[in-house]
Image (cartoon, rainbow, N blue to C red):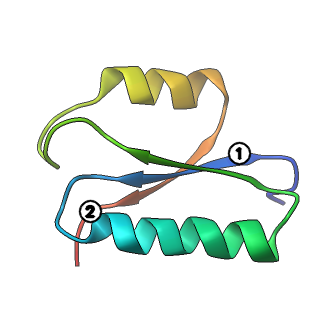
Amino acid sequence: SLDGRTVYFVDSGFPTTDVFMRELANWFAKNMPNVKTEFRQKIGSFFDDDPKLWAEIKEKKALVVLGVGH
């Protein structure tokens, strides 16, 4: 179950991925109110690492949906 969990919806920087990730986060917020949602844009392009973001997610023991393109 996802109840009580945090799910990060992460935009990888691929064009228009942010739109889709925001829609997913909004759907979860509306339809699964017991799940905390966080939308983040990782730094750089989809080829770049974002150690600070991954550390934040790991620290919170959160789940990730990573948008990588279409």
For the C terminus, the quadrant is bottom left
| Disc 1 element | strand
Asked whether 24 or 68 is in front, the reply is 24
64 horizontally vs 20: left or right: right
Asked if residue 60 lies left or right of residue 69, the reply is right
Residue 14 has which mark? none
Q: Which residue is depicted at the point 73% across and 66% down? A: 29
**In the picture shown, does residue 36 fall above or below 67?**
above
Image label count = 2
Compared to residue 37, the image places residue 69 above or below, namely below
* Location of residue 32 with respect to 65 vertically, above or below: below
Q: Which residue is mark 2?
A: 68
Q: Decide which of tag 2 and tag 1 comes sooner along the chain.
A: 1
Residue 26 at x, y = what percent?
Answer: 62, 70
Classify mark 1: residues with Cα within 10 Å, few (<14), some (14-19) or many (20+). some
Badge 2: few (under 14), some or many (20 or more) residues near its Cα, within 10 Å? some
Residue 3 placement: quadrant: bottom right
The percent position of residue 62, horizontal first and vertical second, equals 64, 39
Q: Amino acid at mark 1?
A: Thr
Q: Which residue is mark 1?
A: 6
Q: Position of residue 33 (x, y in %)?
A: 85, 64
Using the numbered discs, state the Cα–Cα distance from disc 2 to disc 1 in whole angstroms: 20 Å
Q: Residue at x 42, y 51 (%)?
A: 10
> Quadrant location of the N terminus?
bottom right
Q: Residue at x 37, y 72 (%)?
A: 19
Q: Position of residue 34 (x, y in %)?
A: 88, 58
Point 53% across, 24% down: residue: 56
